[in-house]
Image: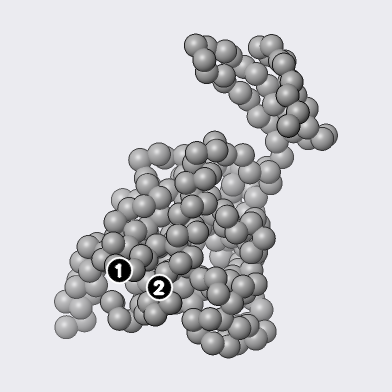
Amino acid sequence: MNIKTMRFGEMEVENDKVLKFVTGPLGFADKLNWVIVENGLLGWLQSVDDPELAFVIANPFEFYEDYEFGISQEEMSVLNISTNKELNVISIVSVPPKVENMTINLLAPIVINIKESTAKQVILSNNKYSVRHYVYGDLMKVKDKQKEVSA
Amino acid sequence: MLVLTRKTNQLIIIADNITIKVIELNDGSVKIGIDAPKHIPVFREEIYKEIQAENKRAAEAPKDFNIEGII
């Protein structure tokens, strides 16, 4: 399918690459269809339904190896997932005008059923995580480490 | 808004599949039990609003923000 986007112009997306949210991200309940645009350590989650709507995303485990991830049985069954191997986790990143102040939402990640391409934003019961965790410094550290490895 | 008075252990039933039970009253706090189908999300208002607001903020990345520019 062909989708229009503000940030990437027109995009050709294979139907099976469209992520279908069971319920839209909080505040965007009616936006059910999304596509991931990968771009290294950060990526984009682009709405298929709204050309202007896109989130910056990241894999939280890239920056926080000890990120503790537990979701309820109910959430697992809504997504038709029975083990952790069947899921992927992405976090939404907020980028303010001053990019160095970017934050990652560790409290409410998006869980993806890899096989079925379904997804849902869940709220972790572990309340040590914040919706606004400063991530720029950690991003730069991981970036530098990757450069060392490839050098 | 519909306002109902309930005592401890009394229920409110919404449609066929949601029940809300007053479990305990204690010093100005009410402990409430909610039974709802799995696809009905239930949140504390504060946390719901916090995440909703953060999602809205995240949807407003600068128009010229370019990931390649920083990584």
Up/down of A108 relative to A58, above or below? above
Residue B31 % position (x, y): 57, 20
The residue to which callout 1 is attached is A99
Residue closer to the observer: A64 or B46: B46
As rendered, which of B60 and A134 lies closer to the eye? B60
Amino acid type indicated by mark 1: Val
* Callouts 2 and 1 in the same chain: no
User: Which quarter of the figure has residue A134?
Assistant: bottom left
Q: Residue furthest front?
A: B1
Looking at the rendered image, the quarter that the N terminus of chain A falls into is bottom right
Please report, as a chain letter, where disc 1 is located. Answer: A
Q: Percent position (x, y) of residue A79?
A: 62, 54
Q: Is residue A116 visible?
A: no
Q: Give coordinates of residue A21: x percent, y percent.
A: 63, 61
Horizontal arrangement in the rendering, residue A29 relative to residue B26 (left or right):
right
In which image quadrant can residue B9 be found? top right
Task: State the residue in front, A2 or B7.
Answer: B7
Q: Is residue A145 among the parts visible in the rendering?
A: yes
- What residue is pinned by disc 2? B62
Residue lying at 82% horizontally and 35% vertically, measured from the top left:
B15
